[in-house]
């Protein structure tokens, strides 16, 4: 059954364009472009978790469910709004948001759009600037 579903997803992606099914996620990290394939979002209570990943890195946003600007304060007192792991083979080194905002500009038919401008720090890796946008990311419950 999994093979059939994967085959159907691949066929649909090819025939309709993957961006139509999954949305787009565009990032600049210190000026270097990164366009992770197949970004996803999950709604849990009053929070969306948006994950964008490739073979070697991962970026996670935790934001509220209403359009608006979310700063780097802990969401609901416990969820880091921004985490970036640049090397998935060494997950002990990661960045967290220290300044900036994630703007959720649209929630329409379970699709999320917005933009972000974040300064992120790591105790071992230093500081980076992260900017970008996401458009029509499918959110599931």
Image (cartoon, rainbow, N blue to C red):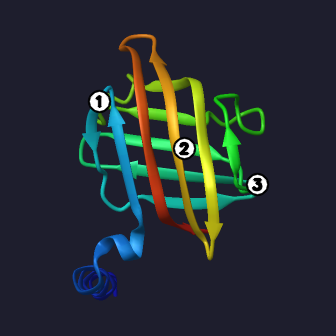
- N-terminal of the two: label 2 or label 3? 3
Label 2 element class:
strand
Circle 1 residue: 31
Residue 55 rendering spot, x and y as whole percentages: 24, 47
Give me the disc on residue 46: 3
Secondary structure under badge 3? loop
Dot placed on the residue nearer the N-terminal end, 3 or 1: 1
C-alpha gap between disc 2 and disc 3: 14 Å
**Residue at horizontal 32 percent and vertical 31 percent from the top:** 86
Q: Do the residues labelled 2 and 1 touch (CB within 8 Å)?
A: no
Inspect this view and state whether residue 63 appears: yes
Q: Is residue 141 visible?
A: no
Residue 34 to residue 124: above or below: below
Residue 94, relative to residue 53: is it above or below? above
How far is mark 2 from mark 1, CA to CA? 20 Å
Res 131 quadrant in image? top left
Q: What element carries label 1?
A: loop
Q: Residues within 10 Å of mark 1 (few under 14, many from 20)?
A: few
Residue 101: percent from the left, percent from the top?
Answer: 60, 34
Callout 2 crowding tier (Cα within 10 Å): few <14, some 14–19, many ≥20? many
Q: Mark 2 points at which residue?
A: 61
Disc number lying in front (2 or 1): 1
User: Badges 3 and 1: C-beta atoms under 8 Å apart?
Assistant: no
């Amino acid at each position: 059954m999994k093979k059939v579903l994967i085959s159907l997803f691949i066929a649909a992606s090819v025939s309709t364009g993957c961006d139509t099914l999954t949305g787009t996620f565009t990032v600049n990290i210190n000026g270097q472009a990164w366009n992770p394939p197949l970004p996803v979002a999950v709604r849990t209570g009053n929070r969306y978790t948006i994950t964008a990943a490739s073979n070697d890195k991962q970026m996670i946003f935790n934001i509220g469910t209403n359009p608006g600007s979310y700063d780097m304060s802990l969401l609901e007192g416990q969820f880091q709004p921004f985490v970036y792991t640049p090397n998935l083979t060494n997950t002990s080194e990661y960045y967290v948001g220290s300044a900036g905002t994630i703007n959720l500009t649209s929630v329409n038919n379970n699709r999320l759009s917005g933009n972000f401008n974040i300064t992120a720090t790591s105790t071992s890796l230093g500081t980076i600037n992260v900017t970008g946008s996401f458009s029509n990311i499918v959110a599931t419950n």
